[in-house]
Image (cartoon, rainbow, N blue to C red):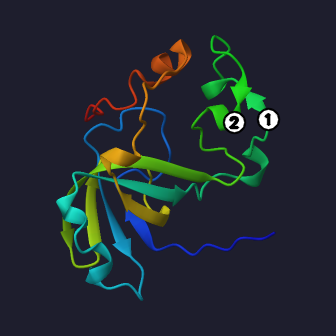
């Protein structure tokens, strides 16, 4: 089976290439493609957060992982399957991030802390609704806390 998906919009952001950490405070815009009107985003600004589903467009075919690997190639962390981590080198290159909705202007959505780079194709946007969040405690292995320690810190300006 083949599935075709067309981008609904594109990210405009400061970062031109993926980086592992310091995504805190980042602002980005998502501008919908032609064919969408402001009605597509109508009401989204009543939600504090949105989930943005996007395509890791800069991942080279040769870098796709279908098995296990050490996250960030860190041998101190266990080798785990690509589906047990959130790395960009995924089989279908699909990423998702819950980010804060800042404002909407016509067909442009401005968000905070979207970890997608400039030019990223957006596949979908969904409001975050509490009833769709986990209904039981979230657990995760210790290495994943270590991996995320600086992910949402703000990047120091140099």
| Above or below: residue 152 compared with residue 42 | above
Q: Is residue 84 toward the left or the right of residue 47 in the image?
A: right
Q: Is residue 1 toward the left or the right of residue 90 in the image?
A: right
Quadrant of the snapshot with the C terminus: top left
In the rendering, at what x and y percent does residue 79 appear? 72, 21
In the rendering, at what x and y percent does residue 102 appear? 19, 56
Q: Is residue 6 toward the left or the right of residue 61 in the image?
A: left
Quadrant of the snapshot with the N terminus: bottom right
Name the residue located 70 percent from the left edge and 25 percent from the top edge. Answer: 80
| Above or below: residue 131 compared with residue 9 | above
Residue 22's mark? none
In the rendering, at what x and y percent does residue 65 appear? 75, 41
Name the residue located 43 percent from the left edge and 29 percent from the top edge. Answer: 136
- Is the C-beta separation of discs 2 and 1 under 8 Å? yes
| Above or below: residue 28 compared with residue 87 | below
In this orientation, does residue 113 appear?
no
- Label 2 and label 1: CA atoms lie apart by 6 Å
| Above or below: residue 122 compared with residue 64 | below
Name the residue that disc number 2 marks. Answer: 82
In this orientation, does residue 76 appear?
yes
Name the residue that disc number 1 marks. Answer: 67
Q: Within 10 Å of the Cα at label 1, are there few (<14), some (14-19), or many (20+) other Cα atoms? A: few
User: What element does badge 2 sit on?
Assistant: helix
User: What element does badge 1 sit on?
Assistant: loop
Q: Nearer the viewer, residue 124 or 89?
A: 124
In the rendering, at what x and y percent does residue 126 appear? 39, 60
Residue 143, image quadrant: top right
* Number of residue marks: 2
Of the residues under marks 2 and 1, which one precedes in the sequence?
1
Q: Within 10 Å of the Cα at label 2, are there few (<14), some (14-19), or many (20+) other Cα atoms? A: many
Name the residue located 61 percent from the left edge and 72 percent from the top edge. Answer: 5
């Amino acid at each position: 089976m083949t599935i075709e998906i067309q981008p609904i919009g594109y990210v405009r952001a400061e970062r031109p290439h993926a980086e592992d950490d310091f995504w805190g405070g980042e602002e980005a815009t998502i501008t919908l493609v032609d064919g969408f009107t402001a009605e597509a985003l109508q009401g989204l600004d009543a939600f504090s957060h949105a989930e943005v589903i996007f395509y890791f467009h800069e991942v080279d075919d040769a870098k796709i992982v279908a098995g296990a690997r050490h996250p960030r190639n860190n041998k101190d962390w266990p080798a785990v399957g690509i589906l047990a981590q959130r790395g960009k080198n995924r089989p279908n290159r699909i990423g998702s991030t819950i980010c804060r909705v800042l404002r909407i202007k016509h067909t442009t959505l401005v968000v905070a802390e979207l970890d997608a780079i400039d030019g990223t194709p957006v596949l979908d946007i969904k409001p975050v609704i509490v009833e769709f969040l986990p209904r039981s405690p979230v657990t995760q292995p210790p290495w994943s806390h270590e991996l995320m320690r600086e992910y949402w810190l703000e990047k120091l300006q140099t």
